[in-house]
Image (cartoon, rainbow, N blue to C red):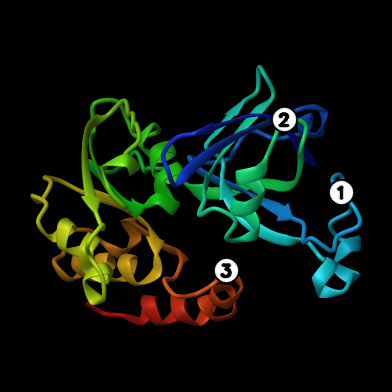
Amino acid sequence: MYGTVVRTEQLTPQLLRVVLGGEGLADFADPPSADAYVNAFFLPEQADYAPPFDTETVRDLPRDRRPYPRRYTVRGWDRATGELTIDFVVHGDVGYAGRWATHAAPGDRLELRGPAGDYSPPATADAYLLVGDESAVPAIAACAEAVPAGAPVTVLLEVEDAAGRCEIASPGELTVHWVHRAGVDGAELDTLLADAVAALPRPTGTLSAFVHGEAESIRAVRRVLLGQGRVSPELLSCSPYWRRGHTDEQWRTVKRDWVREMHADQP
């Protein structure tokens, strides 16, 4: 399937919203979970084709002509209007996905597959903790909207500075903490979120934690949460979206082994 750009909106200096619609989304299914995603296919400059295309057929093309698949959170799906909302972290023309989003204009098309996903805030928890950086804002915002009404939910987000803050809403009893990394460098960047999590008061009852974002940062947060006994492993969703110092392609080649090592940690 494919979506056609309807409009775009700059939410923050790093976060760009793209709303897709059109007949190419006629068969789009309702997302199966709060943290649902689509696989989007971004074309290299050498591509001599355009959406819609057969994603199986293009696999046989030379590498420099094959699309680059990237996984993106379904920020919103409105069945009534047939509009799909995806929020992109952008850094100018860096990266295939960010470059496409930066230059996206009404009428442009994006090939998609999905949606898929299996995480929603469990109704059995007494409190919820959602932690990440800009790359996790769409997933965290969607999960905050899906917690039970009145339940305590704490959101902790790392952004560059105050300009990176955006609206987070929830039917729960919401508390949002912002951590700014401007002026922080070196090893301190890896523990910025973890130190902020360690400083949070402990919630009462059973905690569910959703920790997604930069690899070393979320690994450090995981160590705090499990090491201090704040959350049980089965109620912790922890996933590295990217890694500092690595391009998307470099990270994809080592991610599986890195995740295996992270889960082997016994804080």
Q: Quadrant of residue 102?
A: top right
Front tag of 2 and 1: 2
Front tag of 3 and 2: 2
Q: Residues within 10 Å of mark 2 (few under 14, many from 20)?
A: some
User: What is the tally of numbered marks visible in this picture?
Assistant: 3
Tag 1 secondary structure: loop
State whether residue 223 is above or below residue 96. below
Tag 2 secondary structure: loop
Distance from label 2 to label 1 (Cα)?
15 Å
Q: Residues within 10 Å of mark 3 (few under 14, many from 20)?
A: some
Tag 3–tag 2 contact (CB < 8 Å): no
Q: What is the number of the mark on residue 188? A: none
State left or right for residue 264 relative to residue 24: left
Q: Amino acid at mark 3?
A: Asp
Distance from label 3 to label 2 (Cα)?
27 Å
Of 173 and 87, nearer the camera is: 87
- Residue behind mark 2: 106
Q: Amino acid at mark 1?
A: Ala
Distance from label 3 to label 1 (Cα)?
22 Å
Can you give x and y, in whole percent of width and height, for residue 217 in the image? 31, 67
State which quarter of the image contains the N terminus: top right
Of 41 and 210, nearer the camera is: 41
Q: Residue at x 52, y 75 (%)?
A: 255
- Residue behind mark 3: 248
Of 255 and 19, nearer the camera is: 19
For marks 3 and 1 on the same chain, the one whose residue lies earlier in the sequence = 1
Q: Residue at x 8, y 49 (%)?
A: 201
